[in-house]
Image (tube, helix red, strand yellow):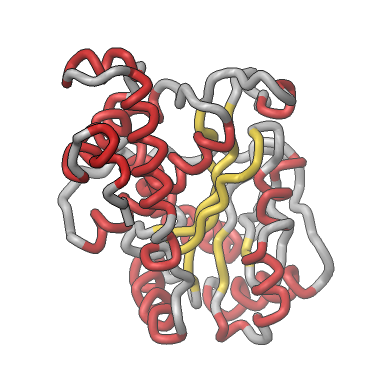
Amino acid sequence: MLDNEMYARYRYTVRQMILITLRFFATGAFFNIIGDSIGYHKCTVSRVVAQVTEAICGHIHQFVMWPDANARAWNMTEFFKKAGFPNVVGCVDGTHIRIQAPSEDEPAFVNRKGFHCINMQTICDIKGKFTSVNASWPGSCHDAHVFRTSGLAAKLTIEHVAFSDGVLLGSYPMNMKSLYALKPFLMAPFIRVDSEAKERYQHAHTRTRACIERSFGRLKRRYHVLHSEIRLRPEKACKVAVAFVILHNIAVDMNMPMDDDEFIQPQNGNDGVHQDGGTGVATRDFIVENFFSV
């Protein structure tokens, strides 16, 4: 919760603090420009944004939650209605959030496209609500590494015991290092398709995981700072990114309308599928055989 210390020292209300922060989230303008437009010094704007962001992030477990058994069952049903892909509980993908060049460990934040960023990985449900977020890795880290070292991956490795527990859909790779490893709980697309059943699997996989692309599109339209760069140190930029996810989920819960971006089909590479053990391969073959074969 926002305390009264800021009001006692600087004489502005919680409402004013929230409006200042939302102004920054929506525009990404320099603090001095925001301050000049509403009559505050840039140092005041900086303090306010930091405190409000911290307060929002303090509620992450209230608004970003891994679905319980009932929610997973509902997601499986709704995802299946979309394209016929069975037992999907969510779609996982990463997005690069541009930041200003940090003064420390600068090369680690340069991604393969040559700009500074953090790699934020999320999972979303059928409604486009984020059920997991990890925004703590620099841009040079690949999606596969971010997921493999996450607490959620460790949790699923232990708790996932059967296909009925549900699966996640991984994204299409842009290079071999970023390719999600095939797991019993994470289904990847085929790169080389040699049967009609696999083509149907591929089509259903693409249509089903479109929700994560739309969710990222909505997030970036709501917070235009994501179209430029977050001009903060990496640790603060990570907190701002998490705050965006929390506010996005609140908007979804409140059924705030937003037009969808046109979905752009991911580009396939020709790298082959990374098979991490045999169980994930067996699960994918089971899906193809039982749901997509005539």
Q: In which quadrant of the rendered view does residue 125 lie?
A: bottom left
Q: Is residue 154 above or below residue 28?
A: below
Q: Is residue 181 left or right of residue 246?
A: right
Q: Residue at x 65, y 45 (%)?
A: 143
Q: Position of residue 265 (x, y in %)?
A: 45, 41
Q: Residue at x 59, y 39 (%)?
A: 119
* Residue 192 seen from this side: no
Q: Nearer the viewer, residue 242 or 173?
A: 242
Q: Position of residue 279 (x, y in %)?
A: 77, 75
Q: Residue at x 58, y 80 (%)?
A: 290
Q: In which quadrant of the rendered view does residue 278 lie?
A: bottom right
Q: Residue at x 74, y 25 (%)?
A: 105
Q: In which quadrant of the rendered view does residue 22 lie?
A: top left
Q: Is residue 278 above or below residue 4?
A: below
Q: Is residue 127 above or below residue 228?
A: below
Q: Is residue 198 left or right of residue 72?
A: right
